[in-house]
Image (tube, rainbow, N blue to C red):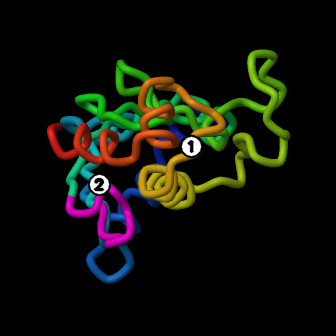
Amino acid sequence: MSSSSAASLLLRQYRDLTDPEKGLRAFHIELEGDNIFTWNIGIAVLNKDSAYYGGYFRSQMKFPQDFPFSPPKFQFTPAIYHPNIYRDGKLCISILHQPGDPTSDEPESETWSPAQSVESVLISILSLLEDPNPSSPANVDASLDYRKNPDTYKKKIAEE
């Protein structure tokens, strides 16, 4: 797929996601300037059962020129205290990993596929944000607090 094809696909998905009738309530999406390959995304946690409930988190998603054949890159800006978020804000989530990644032992069925839409990626990210996966930590301290010291974990989240 050419970069113009990727741009057309992204523009279509961007329009759907920012349409008040079709879009996802938990997300506020804007382009970085007029660059269709870089999206600034605000994520509101609306699930009352989540430790992150009421939080609004800024992030950025960057799409490669060969999208959807390669996954986008995603990063919280700034980073947040979460078991699956590295200290630099990058997210550890299988849906954004290339299939066959030698550094990962994830089943290929859980990794990136060109059939994924930006919407499905955002829903997966929100789900992981609301309900962390401590068995695959990017932030070991947050994972330990989440599992062994839930009160400390919630306190650190509230301080951010």
Q: In the image shown, does 159 or 113 lie closer to the viewer?
A: 159
Query: Residue 2 placed where, x, y %?
Result: 61, 33
Describe the element under mark 2 as helix, strand or loop: strand
Under mark 2, the amino acid is: Ile
Magenta-drawn stretch contains 52: yes
Looking at the rendering, which quadrant does residue 66 occupy?
Answer: top right
Residue appearing at x 21%, y 55% in the figure: 55
Q: Nearer the viewer, mark 2 or mark 1?
A: 2
Q: Which residue is mark 1?
A: 5
Q: Is residue 86 left or right of residue 151?
A: right
Q: In the image shown, does 61 or 44 lie closer to the viewer?
A: 44
Under mark 1, the amino acid is: Ser
Q: Which residue is mark 2?
A: 43
Residue appearing at x 65%, y 37% in the figure: 135
Magenta-drawn stretch contains 80: no
Q: Is residue 18 above or below residue 134?
A: below
Magenta extent: 45-54
Q: In the image shown, does 2 or 18 lie closer to the viewer?
A: 18
* Cα gap from disc 2 to disc 1, whole angstroms: 27 Å
Residue occupying the far bottom of the picture: 21
Looking at the rendering, which quadrant does residue 130 occupy?
Answer: bottom left
Residue appearing at x 53%, y 29% in the figure: 64
The chief SS type of the magenta part is loop
For the C terminus, which image quadrant?
top left
Describe the element under mark 1 as helix, strand or loop: helix
Query: Residue 26 placed where, x, y %?
Result: 31, 66
Q: In the image shown, does 123 or 12 lie closer to the viewer?
A: 123
Q: Is residue 44 above or below residue 85?
A: below
Query: Residue 20 placed where, x, y %?
Result: 26, 77
Q: Earlier in the sequence, mark 2 or mark 1?
A: 1
Q: Is residue 129 left or right of residue 103?
A: left
